């Protein structure tokens, strides 16, 4: 990848509705199969053009079917709660499927995509499956850290959903581990080919919305040894069953992941990063990794970073040994050495290694904007004193998919990672903390990206002490803070009668109807990961700031303080009222600052926040240890 276009994708976009179909010609892939019956094409086109048509009415059950997609739930014997599923055609449009996930199934839009191994087959797949069944410290660490990082980054985890696949098993174990800790927000989505499933979910007597009782393990039919029929992993939360053979499921999954990762689906101002996580695998995994690293691949249409988990067997081990120059600080003797056949690796797999490993090595050495190679490795150290921070390794690798350093720093603050943030500040402190009204920022960021939000503002709203301390160590200034965004009702520590109605209420967000092209879905940016979804940052430089705070009289308390002092500037209405009411002498303090601003030539007397204002807010605001962290959830009702 070139340094000018590190992600190999369109520039980040944050439209009114990220689920609206893209403009014609913006994708290289054709979404509609040419071999479809004319009636179904006409009906599907008419339905998709109607903004009020729900996704399930647009999606079809198969390419040659006029029936809408089948849907329902799967109840597994080993799981208390059923999982949702949809059975649809392989040529389904990606934006309609995403609308199904967000609008119909009410998933919080992702701020990251974690993609695990594709389906495996052959003798090596059996060996890696047996390897993953071992209860080793590495396997325990994998499921724990994957659950942690999925929740922390608000990621959607994609896998093939097959019980015999090592990556899908790790995803299922991570979901089960997270459920025990109360991590119920992270979806683990399986994209499965109906032609590979041992037990069909729909038949002639099937009715939509039905709960299917899964019993594949008890009803295995007599089938040829090479049938490659698989069971589903019971721990996934959602199943997208794609009609037909495996090729159709792989194509739909590629389009889904590309659609999500090529734009700002969550509305947080950051292009959604994507990461391929390699755990075990076979020849199919080798090709999947190679295509993921190639920005000219016609299927993936982009290049994304890859993190290989060493010592998990199969393809992951072979990629690690072939492409890693050093292992534990010592020169790797197997570097660029061809893989040889053995009891687990047959001739076909060795031939695939000879074809794909050199290309993986070459493509993996390319770098993005942060000069980090796109192919990275995580090597588990069995030493009890070793850190083995897989979560940090996944976050680091995800940052390789960001188009510029500004978005990397915003994600580091959103994730609450002072280590990553400090590294970025050391490299480019001036750019990350400089005011946005400089020439480079007239049309957005220095890299052409949309205007970034202030890092200190994000950290304060998250009330992340360590991140705030890191920013202050690098002399972050409070002058660009939108004070009213700190004086919101959810931060009111002393809900006394005198300040009732003065704290800024949460904005009213209307949920758009399924399939609607207008409005904005009730998503919550994970920049403020554990805050309620009602809070929303308004950029300081936004021209809509004054209009947002110029609320009608019945929506805003008009105090005598405002009449005496006047407006202090955009973003000061609620903060001014609360501070002057609860802090003795603060009204006079603000008036003096306003008069000094006029004498200094500010004209209208607008003042900027100082550390004194932030200190007073810290006293009045609800501290983190008195609040139970909550993940953002779509809580507003449809209108």
Image: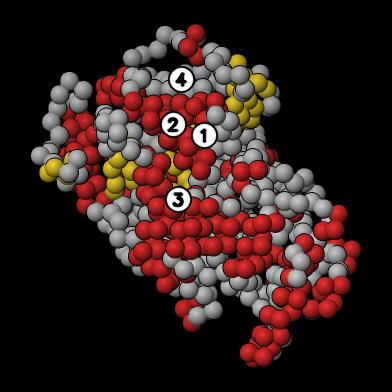
Residue assigned mark 1: 188
* Foreground: disc 4 or disc 3: 3
Mark 4 is surrounded, within 10 Å at the Cα level, by few (under 14), some (14 to 19) or many (20 or more) other residues, namely some
**Mark closer to the chain start, 4 or 3:** 4
Q: Quick check: marks 2 and 1 in contact, CB under 8 Å?
A: no
Q: How many tags in the picture?
A: 4
Instruction: Give percent across and percent down for residue 5.
Output: 37, 64
Q: Residues within 10 Å of mark 2 (few under 14, many from 20)?
A: many
Secondary structure, mark 2, is helix
Task: Please report whichever mark, 1 or 4, sits nearer to the chain's N-terminal start.
Answer: 1
**In whole angstroms, how far apart are the C-alphas of marks 4 and 3?**
38 Å
Task: Please state if 36 lies on the left or on the right of 339 as rendered.
Answer: right
Residue 277 seen in render: no
**Residue hosting label 2:** 144
**SS under mark 3:** loop
Helix, strand or loop at disc 4? loop
Residue beneath the point at 54% across and 25% down: 180
Q: Nearer the viewer, residue 484 or 132?
A: 484
- Identify the mark nearer the N-term, 4 or 2: 2
In whole angstroms, how far apart are the C-alphas of marks 2 and 3?
Answer: 18 Å
Residue annotated with mark 3: 417
Position of residue 79 measured from the top left corner of the image (x, y, whole percent)? 57, 19
């Amino acid at each position: 990848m070139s340094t000018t276009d590190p992600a190999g994708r369109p520039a980040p976009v944050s439209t009114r509705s990220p689920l609206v179909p893209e403009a014609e010609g913006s994708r290289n892939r054709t979404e509609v199969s040419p071999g479809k019956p004319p009636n179904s094409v006409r009906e599907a086109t008419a339905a998709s053009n109607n903004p009020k048509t729900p996704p399930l009415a647009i999606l079809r059950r198969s390419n040659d079917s006029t029936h809408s997609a089948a849907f329902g739930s799967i109840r597994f014997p080993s799981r208390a709660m059923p999982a949702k599923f949809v059975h649809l055609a392989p040529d389904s449009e990606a934006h309609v499927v995403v609308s199904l996930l967000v609008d119909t199934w009410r998933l919080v839009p992702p701020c990251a995509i974690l993609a695990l191994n594709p389906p495996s087959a052959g003798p090596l797949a059996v060996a890696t499956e047996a390897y993953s069944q071992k209860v080793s410290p590495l396997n325990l660490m994998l499921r724990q850290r994957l659950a942690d990082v999925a929740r922390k980054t608000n990621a959607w985890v994609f896998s093939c959903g097959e019980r015999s696949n090592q990556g899908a098993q790790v995803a299922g174990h991570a979901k089960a581990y997270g459920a025990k800790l109360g991590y119920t927000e992270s979806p683990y989505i399986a994209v499965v080919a109906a032609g590979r499933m041992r037990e069909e979910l729909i038949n002639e007597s099937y009715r939509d919305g039905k709960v299917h009782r899964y019993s594949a393990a008890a009803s295995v039919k007599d089938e040829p040894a090479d049938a490659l029929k698989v069971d589903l992993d019971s721990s996934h939360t959602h199943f997208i069953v794609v009609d037909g053979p495996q090729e159709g499921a792989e194509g739909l999954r590629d389009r889904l992941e590309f659609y999500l990762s090529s734009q700002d689906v969550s509305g947080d101002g950051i292009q959604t990063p994507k990461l391929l996580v390699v755990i075990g695998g076979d020849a199919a995994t080798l090709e999947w990794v190679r295509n993921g690293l190639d920005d000219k691949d016609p299927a993936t249409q982009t290049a994304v970073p890859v993190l290989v988990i060493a010592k998990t067997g199969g393809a992951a081990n072979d990629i690690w040994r072939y492409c890693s120059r050093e292992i534990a600080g010592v020169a790797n003797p197997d570097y660029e050495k061809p893989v040889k056949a053995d009891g687990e690796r047959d001739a076909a797999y060795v031939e695939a290694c000879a074809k794909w490993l050199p290309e993986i090595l070459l493509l993996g050495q390319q770098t993005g904007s942060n000069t980090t190679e796109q192919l990275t490795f995580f090597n588990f150290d069995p030493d009890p004193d070793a850190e083995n921070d897989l979560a940090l390794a996944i976050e680091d690798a995800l940052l390789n998919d960001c188009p510029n350093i500004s978005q990397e720093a915003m994600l580091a603050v959103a994730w609450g990672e002072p280590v990553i943030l400090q590294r970025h500040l050391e490299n480019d402190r001036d750019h990350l903390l400089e005011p946005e009204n400089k020439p480079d920022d007239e049309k957005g960021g220095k890299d052409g990206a949309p205007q970034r939000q202030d890092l200190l503002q994000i950290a304060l709203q998250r009330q992340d002490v360590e991140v705030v301390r890191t920013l202050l160590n690098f002399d972050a200034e409070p002058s660009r803070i939108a004070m009213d965004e700190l004086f919101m009702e959810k931060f009111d520590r002393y809900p006394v009668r005198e300040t009732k109605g003065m704290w800024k209420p949460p904005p009213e967000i209307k949920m758009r109807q399924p399939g609607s092209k207008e409005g904005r879905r009730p998503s919550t940016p994970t920049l403020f990961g554990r805050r309620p979804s009602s809070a929303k940052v308004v950029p300081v430089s936004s021209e809509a700031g004054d209009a947002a705070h110029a609320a009608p009289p019945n929506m805003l308390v008009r105090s005598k303080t405002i009449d005496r002092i006047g407006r202090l500037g955009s973003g000061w209405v609620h903060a001014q009222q609360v501070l002057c009411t609860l802090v003795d002498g603060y009204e006079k303090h603000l008036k003096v600052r306003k008069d000094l601003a006029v004498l200094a030539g500010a004209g209208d007397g607008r003042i900027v926040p100082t550390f004194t204002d932030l200190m007073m807010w810290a006293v009045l605001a609800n501290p983190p240890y008195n609040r139970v962290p909550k993940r953002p959830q779509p809580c507003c009702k449809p209108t």
